[in-house]
Structures are given as C-alpha cells and as structure tokens.
Amino acid sequence: MTEVRAGMLLVATPVLLDPNFVETVVLLLDVDDQGALGVVLNRPSAIPVDAVLDGWGDVVVEPEVLFQGGPVSTQGALAVATLRAEDDVPVGFRTVEGRLGLLDLDTPVELLEGSLEGLRIFAGYAGWGADQLAGEIEEGSWYVVPALEPDVFRMDPASLWRDVLRRQPGELAWHSTRPVDPELN
C-alpha cells in the first residue's frame, strides 16, 4: 500500500457505495495521528464563486464555480492553490506539498497578484477520524495513488476518476474501464 500523506490522492474503489464518494478523487490536504482531511476534486457545483465570495471569481481557474469538497462543513470553504514559484509565498498561504497549499480566504485578493498559478475553492471537505481512513483503505474502499499537478485544477474534471486509474501500473489501470453498472456488461 502506498503511504497515506498530504498531497496524495484517494480514488474511490468500485466497492465504495456512499453517494458522497462514488467515483470520487480526493486530494489529501492533512494527515496526522488525529485523522485526515481532503477535498473531492471532481464534483463541480453550478454555483459561481463570485456569487458566494465577491472578488474571488477572477482569481480561480476555470470553471469559475465552487466545488463540492465533501460532506463535512459544507457552509465553509477551503481554497487550494498552487504557487508560481516555491520562493514566492503570499500572505495566508500554507504549504501542503511542494508548490501546492491552502490559502486563507481572508487574504485580500490584491495581495495574491502574480503569485498563484492555480486556485480552486471547495465548499466543505472530506474528513476522517484517527484510524478511520486506514480502516476504509484496508476494507478496500480507497486506492491511494500519487497526485499530478494537473489533477487539482482540471478544466473538466468529469473524467478525472478514470484518468487517474488509467495511468496507474498493473491491474489498477483495469478498473478505469469498468462499466458504471457491471450487471449490464
């Protein structure tokens, strides 16, 4: 099993039937002894960012909508960003892995000019208590795989689940071709 740490992806397996997570790809943002926290990368909403956070619509990458980050604290928002350069860190940025990090949404937008390569805002997040995620991985609900920079800010995330699986080595790639309803196969 791949090490579970911030910056990795959780890819829902076919046995995960929770409607919050069917065919999702979750970017892990924090993993420690207390638990884990991440955001679902492939669930865009129809709500424009500017409708909720005035002025942020011009800063986020396309599509300029809020993403459904997960079922926890859906009234709150997390901003995931990539820096243009690791040595140009704006106020309110906390590194997760390399140039990827979290941005405090209380940061004035004008202070970010030129420092970010990508930014996406997620309503809610996915969270696991201590040992909960390890148990779900052990029972076969999640594949743990490395993330690539383009995964986080895809313009059209609809095929992200299949694309992430397709690039994995060995038998894991086969799962990318499974039909939505195997009974129809």
Image: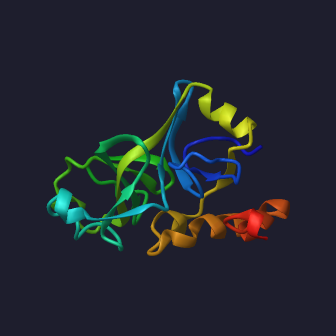
Image coordinates of residue 139 in percent, x first then y, are 74, 37
Q: Where 33 falls versus 31 (above or below)?
A: above
Residue 21 shows in this picture:
yes
Q: Residue at x 35, y 70 (%)?
A: 61
Image coordinates of residue 85 in percent, x first then y, are 41, 63
Quadrant of the drawing holding the N terminus: top right
Q: Residue at x 85, y 63 (%)?
A: 170
Rendering colour mode: rainbow
Q: Where 122 falls versus 173 (above or below)?
A: above
Q: Residue at x 43, y 58 (%)?
A: 86
Residue 115: quadrant of the picture:
bottom left
Residue 116: quadrant of the picture:
bottom left
Q: How many marks?
A: 0
Image coordinates of residue 58 in percent, x first then y, are 22, 70
Image coordinates of residue 30 in percent, x first then y, are 50, 39
Q: Residue furthest right?
A: 170
Q: Where 40 falls versus 135 (above or below)?
A: below
Of 162 and 14, nearer the camera is 14
Quadrant of the drawing holding the C terminus: bottom right
Residue 168 shows in this picture:
no
26 lies left or right of 53: right
Of 95 and 18, nearer the camera is 18
13 lies left or right of 130: right
Of 79 and 88, nearer the camera is 79
Q: Residue furthest front?
A: 184
105 lies left or right of 185: left
Q: Residue at x 24, y 61 (%)?
A: 112
